[in-house]
Image (cartoon, rainbow, N blue to C red):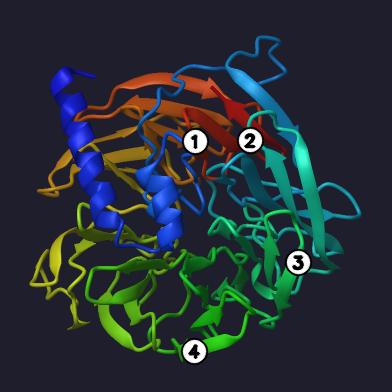
């Protein structure tokens, strides 16, 4: 990238980290992941520090080949097999990587990838075992594994989904795993179970179609927040990190008919709020009480992307049902902030794009631009300050994107279900600088630490450096 763009990207990244340091993680986490990235550069939750999907400060790989069937593997530092099937993304703390999975006992679980419209459930609701695994970050050697449950799944899953979609989260002392109907678990970092909690059946269905549970837990200081939008009984709740005791529960009937995104927790200096993607309303709650703070009428009726903070604004996107809005909301919002017909902004909504959002993948903001990849292979980019579209193009016919985007070292990484990772140069024009083969479908969001990219494919954890 040019020297000017490099400087601007660095400026924007610093602003993003300052703004998002008001967010979800405990003070210890922020101190270790933001203030001293050279020491460890932790990636402690879905989409990394502060959920922004960015990890600058190191040189990261551009070109590699991880497809072992080609006989020309390059750029792979190590590869570790992960049993079963899960879209649980890897997280990193210090020299350890943690990931969750579900293992079908009677055979290999099937996965149907690509762009298609039918919604048949997967035929594998027989007995499974749910596991949490820990690997050494430098070598890929497995440090420990813990079988936390063996049973038949309480709900169905879509053919593209899995029975272990959610990503773990840690504050550096405790490790939290939540698999929806299969329970909430708290471990120490050596795999010792500290406590468990059963929240009952949470059937994240849509019009009777079983999609599977996918909302990862959020963590702030002594509170775990879980979004459980079973259409029959949708709720959001806060639970004690120390023992799992329920602190509050807010019912979402009439507010949301289903959501699959992870909650955003952040503190803007005056209050700590929990922002949830949803339909018909995107909603924010007070972390201390569960009381609603504001709501915004959304658009897409299957809301999946996770809200996050960028340059001091709350970024929210969703799609499906003919609508795909993209919003940038001011953290000071109060009450009903829904836009009037034909309007794209108001006192609380800094800007919006009526048809610019993404369906499954969470976008990334980097170097002054927001990038969104979709399940049909379309990549969009907008100027983050003005909301002006700067490009929209297809990555290719085999570029179905479900994983969320991440950015580092002046590059945007776009994993696809077909098993390729497209690398584009950050900036206002689409410049694909590499297409790298992984050898397996990639639906989990990668992690980045100290210049190494960690991809979880359908069968392996792969370190690229």
- The residue identified by callout 2 is 137
Measure how far apart labels 4 and 1 are at the Cα level.
35 Å
Identified at 53% across, 59% down, the residue is 171
Could you tell me which secondary element the residue under label 3 belongs to?
Answer: strand
Q: Which residue is mark 4?
A: 248
Above or below for 145 versus 398 = below
The disc placed on residue 33 is none
Q: Could you tell me which residue is drawn at 70 percent across and 32 percent down?
A: 140
Instruction: Look at the image and tell me whether residue 394 can be seen.
Output: yes
Q: Which residue is mark 3?
A: 193
Q: Residues within 10 Å of mark 3 (few under 14, many from 20)?
A: some
Precedes in sequence: disc 2 or disc 1 = 2
Q: Position of residue 154 (x, y in %)?
A: 75, 74
Residue 85 rendering spot, x and y as whole percentages: 73, 49
Closer to the N terminus: mark 3 or mark 4?
Answer: 3
- Give the CA separation, mark 3 to mark 4: 24 Å
Density class for disc 2 (Cα within 10 Å; few <14, some 14-19, many ≥20) is: many
Residue under circle 1?
Answer: 449
The reply to whether dot 4 and dot 1 touch (C-beta < 8 Å) is no
What distance separates the C-alpha of mark 2 from that of mark 1?
A: 9 Å
2 and 1 marks in contact (CB < 8 Å): yes
Mark whose residue sits in front, 3 or 4: 3
> Which residue is at the far right?
106
Examine the image and state in which quarter residue 203 appears: bottom right
Query: Which is closer to the viewer, label 2 or label 4?
Result: 2
Circles 3 and 1: CB distance less than 8 Å? Answer: no
In front here: 213 or 453? 453
| Secondary structure of residue under mark 4 | strand
Determine the secondary structure under disc 2: loop
Distance, label 2 to label 3, CA atoms, is 22 Å
Residue 351 drawn above or below residue 432: below
């Amino acid at each position: 990238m040019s020297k000017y763009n490099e400087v601007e990207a660095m400026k924007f990244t610093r602003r993003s980290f300052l703004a998002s340091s008001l967010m979800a993680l405990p003070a210890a986490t922020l101190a270790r992941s933001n203030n001293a990235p050279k020491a460890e550069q932790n990636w402690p939750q879905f989409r990394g520090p502060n959920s922004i999907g960015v990890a600058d400060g190191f040189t990261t790989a551009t070109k590699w080949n991880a497809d072992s069937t080609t006989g020309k593997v390059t750029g792979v530092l190590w590869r570790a097999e992960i049993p079963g099937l899960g879209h649980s993304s890897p997280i990193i703390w210090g020299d350890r990587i943690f990931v969750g999975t579900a293992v079908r006992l009677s055979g290999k679980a099937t996965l149907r990838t690509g762009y298609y419209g039918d919604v048949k459930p997967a035929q594998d609701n027989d007995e499974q075992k749910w596991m949490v695994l820990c690997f050494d970050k430098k070598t890929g050697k497995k440090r420990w594994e813990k079988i936390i449950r063996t049973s038949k799944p309480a709900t169905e899953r879509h053919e593209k989904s899995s029975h272990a979609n959610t990503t773990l989260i840690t504050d550096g002392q405790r490790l939290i795993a939540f698999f929806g109907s299969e329970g909430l678990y708290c471990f120490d970092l050596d795999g010792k179970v500290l406590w468990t909690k059963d929240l009952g059946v949470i059937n994240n269905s849509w019009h009777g179609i079983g999609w599977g549970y996918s909302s990862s837990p959020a963590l702030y200081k002594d509170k775990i927040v879980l979004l459980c939008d079973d259409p029959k009984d949708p709720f959001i709740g806060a639970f004690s990190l120390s023992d799992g005791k329920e602190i509050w529960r807010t019912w979402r009937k009439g507010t949301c008919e289903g959501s699959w995104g992870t909650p955003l927790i952040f503190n803007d200096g005056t209050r700590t709020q929990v922002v949830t993607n949803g339909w018909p309303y995107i909603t924010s709650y007070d972390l201390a009480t569960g009381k609603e703070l504001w709501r915004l009428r959304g658009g897409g009726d299957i809301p999946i992307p996770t809200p996050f903070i960028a340059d001091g604004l709350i970024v929210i996107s969703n799609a499906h049902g003919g609508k795909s809005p993209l919003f940038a909301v001011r953290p000071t919002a109060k009450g009903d902030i829904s836009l009037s017909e034909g309007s794209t902004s108001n006192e609380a909504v800094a800007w919006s794009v009526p048809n610019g959002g993404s369906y499954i993948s969470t976008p990334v903001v980097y170097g002054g631009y927001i990038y969104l990849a979709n399940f049909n292979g379309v990549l969009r980019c907008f100027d983050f300050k003005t909301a002006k579209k700067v490009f929209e193009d297809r990555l290719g016919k085999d570029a179905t994107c479900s994983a969320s985007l991440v950015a580092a070292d002046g590059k945007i990484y776009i994993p696809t279900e077909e098993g390729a990772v497209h690398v584009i140069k950050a900036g206002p024009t689409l410049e694909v600088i590499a297409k790298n083969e992984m050898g397996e479908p990639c639906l989990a969001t990668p992690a980045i630490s100290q210049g190494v990219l960690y991809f979880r494919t359908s069968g392996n954890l792969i370190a690229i450096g």
